[in-house]
Amino acid sequence: YAEELLDHVQIGNPKATLNGWPDKVRLMQENWIGKSEGVRFAFPHTIQDASGALIGDGKMYVFTTRADTIMGVTFCAVAPEHALATHAAANNPALAAFIEECKTGGTTEAELATQEKKGMATGLSVMHPLTGEAVAVWVGNYVLMSYGDGAVMGVPAHDERDFAFAKKYNLKIQQVVAAEGESFDLQTWADWYGDKQRAVCVNSGAFDGLPYKAAVDAVAAQLAAKGLGEKKTTFRLRDWGVSRQRYWGTPIPIIHCAEHGAVPVPEQDLPVVLPQDCIPDGSGNPLHKHEGFHAGVVCPVCGQPARRETDTMDTFVDSSWYFMRYCDPANTEKMVADGADYWMPMDQYIGGIEHAILHLMYFRFYHKLMRDAGLVQSDEPATNLLCQGMVVAETFSRSGTDGQTDWINPADVELERDERGKITGGKLRADGSAVQLGAVEKMSKSKNNGVDPQGLVDRYGADTVRLFSMFAAPPDQSLEWSDSGVEGAFRFIKRLWTLVNTHIDQGPTVVLDITSLNDEQKEMRRLLHDAIAKVSDDVSRRYTFNTAIAAIMELCNHLSRFDDHSEQGRAVQQEACLAIVRMLNPIIPHVCENLWAALGETTALYSASWPEADEAARKKLQLELVIQINGKVRGRLEASPGIDKDSALEQALQIENIQRHLEGVSIRKVILVPDRLLNIVVG
RNA sequence: GCGAAAGUGGCGGAAUUGGUAGACGCGCUGGAUUUAGGUUCCAGUGGGGGAACCCGUGGGAGUUCGAGUCUCCCCUUUCGCACCA
């Protein structure tokens, strides 16, 4: 499935269907799948093992993306675990010791990054597939058994790692690729040596003059003619071993019989259920030692006593399709039923970035597997993906009595600020002692900077905590926790409550008659319907709930200044209040349900429709045109929408400040951005 | 080492298609109310300057009438991968 997993997720691939996924995740999956197109070919040899058989049938296979440089091969390197390495080490204690050293080498990131490229000659040689020359085989600590065939061709002139290796061990460096305007220097590596784009073959006989792609094709054709190789696509993605020696996983329904081997549990005996009394003691496979799990188990074929499979499945197996059970919760007969056809693929999946290449790869793979088993109709499990950010908070510390750092919870700290308001440190609430301000970090037990939302829910209510969480940052960014930010959210809710109730206290309103409104009332409605349009777009398309809330706050600020107690003025207020309550309902539902009823509505708020922007109401009566001179703002003027360049310029020239800036210079050009700005270019 | 993203006031963040940088909120300053604290309300709040104005989106170049936004180089931070032939 590697190819299909790549095609559907790859950015820019015509077959891609996951365009609603973040680019970051798509790229991570692409790199993880690691598709690499090249040539797999063999170096023939006559090396025999102890029994006299040819090792690998006399062929040492390698994989390369640079077949065009095949005439520059001056050595080969194999992984320490390679059969040829093992063979050579049998009579070579120094080599055996080197191989052991490679195996014990560190595998941490830091160790790998600094680890030196090391090797040792095996004394063996293989034959170059095209020239027939002998090529020495080395063991290299940088060659991975798990990728390709565990062996590589060494072309030091055109691979940076091979170059370093050849320098270190005095191996021959043979230039076989040239680039226009560059000269090759045996002493120092230059980036162009390995650049496919600029490469043209030289010193390569029949291939001379060919650019990269043509040379690869020609080399592959020659190798194929000799029966030694062909073009091949290699993937970094490997098989998924689903079994685990764990108690807590889905049992694998297999019975092991001494005579018949691994036999599937008959369907009528499914499901195999985990024993409830198994207590893992940390040693060995817990189910293997649990006799009750095997009691009475017989081979389905011969009926003789047998034992169950004791490995369980990786929990990633379960998380790869659990969500489809929600589509048909009452169905007890099938793995998935008709509901999955209706609901899948899911429109929006939300999860942390930490799942980018584990769960999110497994569940895509498993979905394709289920599709090919006829269980689901779709190709992919989720159309859109949102990776939410983490919650972070400031850290506070002080030195403890024994010299170690004590981390103080932010809830116990009184902040100290300088006159600008910058936080400089803090004091412990309990005893007033100074604490040191640290970095803003992911909430954790070790840094003691976690905040319990329950305490805030008790104090301010769930709506306040919800509002702050949505307002503090866009959902895909990390959210910095701030107690004063929570208080700000609480203040807004109180202001909203006062705003709506002040309106309600003035009594019932009449039906809005938009034809009879004055300019101020029209302007208030324009602000309202602009806000509805923005909030609708933010919530449904952009998922920027923080800016949606900001737009509603702004609208509330305008509405509290709209002091119109006329019948139609109050009708406008009623329209605005009802729209605000509906827009805020998903975020602060408890408050909104109350306000909705108080505004005189008798149906439930959750069944009310989302407000729609009235485009006619959004037309501006007057607008402010910014006047720039050479791109700098020098004035503004009140204008009617659709004002043309000439009349805008004419009016702009009346402005005193504009006149001053035009003294002694001539106008070269005038640019009008309709209804926004006028730029006068002078020189 | 490779790949990706980001860098905007004191802070979280806004600026959606190259068109008024700093929306909204926090914090801070001043004022009103209050016995006081808290709450609430009003005004101010990027920097410099008396003002006109100048400077300002990590640094440096460039494209453009116009750049936070586009291009190139550099710096820093964060994330991902790990010798991938």
Image: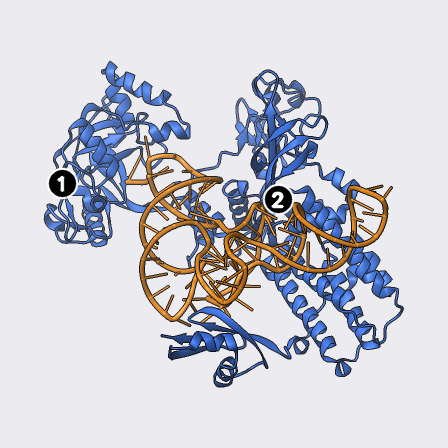
Please tell me how crowded label 1 is: few (under 14), some (14-19), or many (20+) other residues with Cα within 10 Å: few
**In the image, A643: left or right of A415?**
left
Instruction: Indicate the quadrant where residue A214 lies.
Output: bottom left
Q: Which residue is mark 2?
A: A421
Rounded to the nearest angstrom, the CA distance separating label 1 from label 2 is: 60 Å
**Amino acid type, label 2:** Gly
Q: Are callouts 1 and 2 both on one chain?
A: yes
Q: Which chain is blue?
A: A
Chain that bears disc 2: A
Q: Which chain is orange?
A: B
Q: Which residue is mark 1?
A: A185
Q: Tag 2 or tag 1, which sits nearer the N-term?
A: 1
Q: State the residue at coordinates (14%, 37%).
A: A186
Residue B26 is situated, as x and y percent measured from the top left of the image, at 67, 48
Residue A190 is situated, as x and y percent measured from the top left of the image, at 21, 42
How many numbered marks are there? 2
**In the image, A655: left or right of A508?**
left
Please tell me how crowded label 2 is: few (under 14), some (14-19), or many (20+) other residues with Cα within 10 Å: few
Q: Secondary structure at mark 2?
A: loop
Residue A92 is situated, as x and y percent measured from the top left of the image, at 23, 16
Chain that bears disc 1: A
Residue A39 visible in this rendered orientation of the protein: yes
| Quarter the C terminus of chain A occupies | bottom left
Q: State the residue at coordinates (29%, 27%).
A: A116
Q: Nearer the viewer, residue A281 or A372?
A: A281
Q: Nearer the viewer, residue A119 or A374?
A: A119
Instruction: Indicate the quadrant where residue A239 lies.
Output: top left
